[in-house]
């Protein structure tokens, strides 16, 4: 049976926001053109795998700013979560298991005392 950890509410909230920011960034990057700068399209059927890209208009300044804002917030949250004081309370040998448990903590509701 897996160990149950009593994660502090700020750590759980930070991890949840990190999940949300990563999902938002991923969705944004999927919507944007494949190249940040305007580039011509290309087709290469001569390699071991065919590669094709349509012409890219590039990203607008607003799109670049939004990606930068999300990446900066993702970095801040990753540092907050990974450097949280809670990890000092966990035995070194158990930290990987605890970290994995935190990543999935949003899948189970918090216990009544939290």
Image: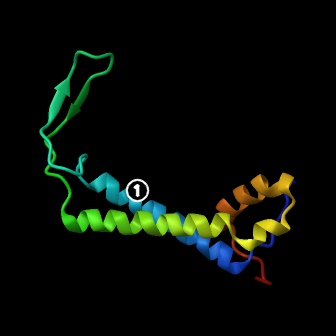
Image check: 2 left or right of 8?
right
Image check: 51 left or right of 25?
left
Q: Position of residue 48 (x, y in %)?
A: 33, 16
Instruction: Decide if residue 100 is in sight here.
Output: yes
Name the residue rendered at 34%, 63% in the picture: 67
Residue 15 versus residue 91: which sits nearer the camera? Answer: 91
Name the residue rendered at 16%, 46% in the picture: 56
Say which quarter of the image contains residue 41.
Answer: top left
Where, quadrant-wise, is the C terminus in this rendering?
bottom right
How many numbered badges does the structure rendering display? 1
Residue 82 versus residue 22: which sits nearer the camera? Answer: 82
**Kind of element beneath mark 1:** helix
Image check: 9 left or right of 28?
right
Q: Position of residue 18 (x, y in %)?
A: 54, 66
Packing grade of label 1 (10 A; few <14, some 14-19, many >=20) is few
Where, quadrant-wise, is the N terminus in this rendering?
bottom right
Name the residue rendered at 72%, 76% in the picture: 110
Q: Is residue 17 above or below residue 26?
A: below
Say which quarter of the image contains residue 62.
Answer: bottom left
Instruction: Decide if residue 104 is in sight here.
Output: no
In the rendered image, the residue lying farthest to the bottom is 113
Q: Is residue 19 above or below residue 109?
A: above
Q: Position of residue 11 (x, y in %)?
A: 67, 74
Q: Which residue is mark 1?
A: 26
Q: Is residue 65 above or below residue 92?
A: below
Q: Is residue 114 above or below residue 16?
A: below
Name the residue rendered at 78%, 83% in the picture: 112
Q: How is the image coloured?
A: rainbow
Q: Position of residue 25 (x, y in %)?
A: 40, 61
């Amino acid at each position: 049976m897996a160990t149950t950890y009593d994660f502090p509410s700020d750590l759980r909230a930070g991890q949840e926001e990190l999940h949300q920011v990563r999902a938002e960034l991923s969705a944004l990057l999927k919507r944007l053109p494949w190249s940040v700068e305007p580039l011509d399209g290309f087709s290469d059927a001569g390699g071991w795998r065919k590669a094709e890209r349509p012409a890219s208009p590039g990203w607008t300044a607003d799109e670049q700013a939004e990606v930068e804002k999300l990446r900066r917030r993702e970095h801040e949250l990753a540092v907050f979560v990974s450097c949280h004081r809670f990890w000092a309370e966990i035995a070194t040998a158990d930290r990987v298991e605890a970290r994995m448990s935190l990543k999935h903590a949003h899948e189970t509701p918090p216990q009544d005392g939290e």
